[in-house]
Image: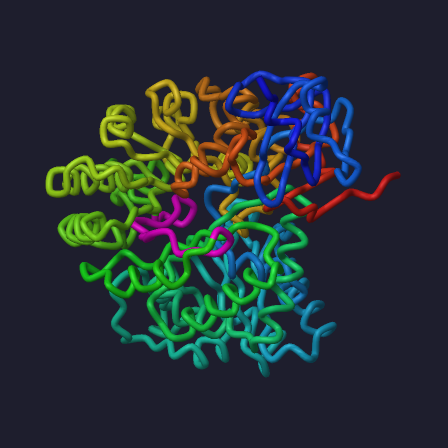
Amino acid sequence: MIDATKSITADIIIKGNAIFTVKDKKLMKGGIAVKGNKIIAVKNYKDINRYISANTEVYDFGDYLIMPGFVDGHDHLWWGAVADSDHMVDLTSSTSEEEAVCMIKDYADCHPEEIRIRGYGWFPANWKNSLLPSKNSLDSIIPDRPVYMNCADAHTCWLNSLALKESGYHTDMKIKSGSVGIDENGELNGLVYEPEALSYAWEKMYDFPEEQMEEIMESFMKGLAAYGVTSLSEMSADEYSRANYDRYKVFKRMAEAGKFTSRVHVYTALMGYTDFSDAKKLAKEFSSDVFRVSGLKGFLDGVTSTYTGFLKEEYADKPGTCGEGVPLVSKEDLEDSVVAANAAGLPVRIHCIADGSVKMALDAFEASEKVNGRHGLKNSIEHIETIDPEDIKRFAKLGVIASMQGEHLALDNNEKIIRVGRKRCRWAWPMRSILDSGVTLALGTDFPVVHYNQFPGIYAAVTRKNYDGSHAGIRNKENITLAEALIANTLGSATVYNREHELGTLEAGKLADIIVIDRNLFEVDSSQIKDARIVFTMMDGKVTFRAEKG
């Protein structure tokens, strides 16, 4: 018999002693043969050499861990790209309003060319539960330029008076969901809550000329490659506006020119719609391997940090409310939108922080199944920071994917214990229970809520620990194994993007998205996971990053 492999040679072969294919779930020694943008073979050392010719480029990474590229299951592409640029001040390290204001002023003084001062990263849990900020502190330092400061959770924005005016906010404006903060004198206080209300501010905050837009995205793509992120998403639930369409056209052009080093999956607006003809047109026009519109996204609640997470029972530290201004849509309107979306062949992903919103979303997916049958679409619930244990088994029954973020455990800074109480924290970030129920788990970062470095989130999912090694939340035994975390951060997230047939594992026929890590994570102490680094990234068969030796 003629061995057909002898006539097939690879463009690139990646060798090593610790290859985690995800498909086999065990490490192997050997190599991965790549031709064009596809993997053509994953073999042991002896057999992989058959694919080598004089023109084959061979990389040998010894004992470093080789695995599929990270597929981040949940990101906000454009918000994140801007946050990752020099056009924003990072307030992540601020511990008070006063400190944040000093950081903002320093940035503004160093950037006189910026017509707007933009920033992100302030977070109530990091300010020792002090009062929320107001426009007054921003007005006192920057009275002559609009100032926009996104909270780390992306559900609150802090503005000065000029930004409020520029965005068109006023005290009696009608908003479908979310709210605009009013002070004791009946005036705008500078805070705006939840996506629909925030859209007015974000339209100005994220407005850039096309040339700057391309510069921001090119820089962002280089960062993603350096951290091994070969797929991510735009989960901002973009409306069907001309501005968003024009931005997509820029991104499509960049992707076609080979300037995208990570595959992007866009989810447009769900809430408030039952006619999804515009969404279907976008999905048809933007449908490449690298940039595509993949489905719909909706926000059902906010975050427990500011009491906008929708709980089934009242907050432990604020009796009398199960969440302020939530749910963001009625049960009837949610079900109408989900049923119509799935009927149109579009998968739905719903932001649900708390147990009340999780149940409501599952009810909507159940309503869709009753009308549309087992449609096979990849519906998902995002975040799931608290859950009623009775709802866990419903995920598998309805075929709903659980999309979660490990690093949010550390970001929470044990605030859940205060907000929902220790008893309900037994079911906080229930990753173990989700997997044990046979549910597909997709892991990601929710960038720019936290950085797109995947290792801290994997570390948190495996150890349930904070950055300093202390325990995150209560000891609820919801840890998952390293292998499970890596699978969720590759194949699991590829599944939520409906691309498990071409991404997420190392096997012949799949797209050649491959990364190499500077240590074998399976052989080091779990404390080292968060400190791991990427030394090599390949996306679509092209080397997009190589760490400098040293």
User: Based on the displayed image, in which of its 4 quarters is residue 19 positioned?
Assistant: top right
Q: Find the residue positioned furthest to the bottom.
A: 144
Q: Quadrant of the C terminus?
A: top right
Q: Is residue 293 magenta?
A: yes
Which is more toward the observer, 11 or 237? 11
Tell me if 337 is positioned left or right of 502 in this view: left
Q: From this viewpoint, is residue 528 visible?
A: no
What number of labels is visible? 0
Q: Is residue 144 above or below residue 236?
A: below
Residue 278 at x, y percent in the picture: 28, 65
Which is more toward the observer, 134 or 298? 298
Residue 41 at x, y percent in the picture: 60, 28
Q: Find the residue positioned furthest to the left.
A: 371
* Magenta span: 289-308
Residue at point 71%, 68% (across, down): 106
Q: Is residue 537 magenta?
A: no
Residue at point 38%, 29% (across, down): 440
Tell me if 358 is positioned left or right of 432 in this view: left
Which is more toward the observer, 309 or 216? 216
